[in-house]
Amino acid sequence: MNPMSFLQPGAPLGGGGAATRRQARAVHAERASASATPMIAHGVVHHQRLRPALHRFTHRVFFLMLPMRTLATSPELLCIPRNRRGLVSFHDCDHGDGGADSQAWLLSLLHEQGIKDADGEIWLQTFPRVLGYVFNPVSFWYCHRADGTLCAILAEVNNTFGERHCYLLTSASPDGALGTVAWGQQLHASKVFHVSPFCAVEGTYRFRFLRRRRVAPHGHSELELERMVARIDHDDAQGPLVLTSISGVLRPLTAASARAAVLAHPFMTVGVMAGIHWQALKLWRKRVPLFSKPAPPRSGVTR
């Protein structure tokens, strides 16, 4: 089974009859259930500010893509420590309410928000801890139905003040019913959470999640890899203000691939926090205006 087949499209984005779409979803569900393998990606964070001063940077990173529902029943599939120390490790308390079961927190949140059909695989895209430390500016929870379709994406945002907020992204039809989130679809949310002192808490976020197949290098033509891209653009009253993305090519997570990632990026997680402050200093030197931190939103979830 192709280890990347969990990311294959489950149905065409347009055209085809109902029977064709049902058949495609069934094939997708069968592949997803058979190949929910933890993944690791080497990639890049891009950031570009357009006003009042142009400012851009890139930062090389690696991140995990974890099948949380599968790991709940088959924990042995995760080859890195979970909720214990390790060179590279995953800790549930780094997400949600800080408890010992982040998936249970997520399912409770979805239920409270009226989403009760996320009964398929739940993939978490996140930074791991490296040598016990992590700061996750944003993690993404991809919530699937049992037929393999994507019913919601949760963007879990952290700021440097120790606060956390979630943006729940869904696709609604004209009558208000929740539909299927398509890869490449543009999703929107009002900005309500303070992240940077150089951006006011106003305007709108535009989210877009992409996936593109490519053949592995070095002659391994039988292995198809997937390039994942998550884009978050911030618009204010004048238009686009900040453009950000995180992208990477996914491969199976093994003890060897985890060690290789640390060797390639030994100070990644510390560097994320250091980079935030370094870029803030550069913006200050460019005389970009500062905004005071407002109180956090009363609700922990925005739709």
Image (tube, helix red, strand yellow):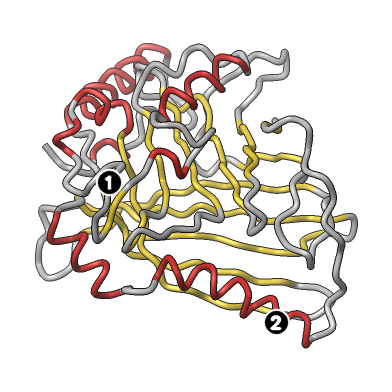
Q: Quadrant of residue 276?
A: bottom right
Q: Secondary structure at mark 2?
A: helix
Residue 159 in picture, x, y percent from top left: 64, 54
Q: Tell me the residue that label 1 is attached to.
A: 84
Residue 250 in picture, x, y percent from top left: 29, 54
Residue 167 in picture, x, y percent from top left: 64, 37
Quote the CA–CA distance across marks 2 and 1. Answer: 35 Å
Quarter containing the C terminus: top right
Position of residue 42 in the picture relative to residue 230 (left or right): left
Q: Amino acid at mark 1?
A: Arg
Residue at x-position 71% and y-position 64%: 242
Residue 205 in picture, x, y percent from top left: 71, 48
Q: Residues within 10 Å of mark 1 (few under 14, many from 20)?
A: few
The relative height of residue 218 versus residue 235 in the rendered view (above or below) is below
Q: Tell me the residue that label 2 is attached to.
A: 281
Q: Amino acid at mark 2?
A: Leu
Label 2 vs label 1, nearer the camera? 1
Residue at x-position 65% and y-position 71%: 48
- Along the polypeptide, which appears first: circle 2 or circle 1? 1
Q: Nearer the viewer, residue 303 or 12?
A: 303
Quarter containing the N terminus: top left
Position of residue 109 in the picture relative to residue 121 (left or right): right
Q: Secondary structure at mark 1?
A: loop
Position of residue 118 in the picture relative to residue 218 (left or right): right
Q: Which label belongs to residue 103?
A: none
Position of residue 295 in the picture relative to residue 234 (left or right): right
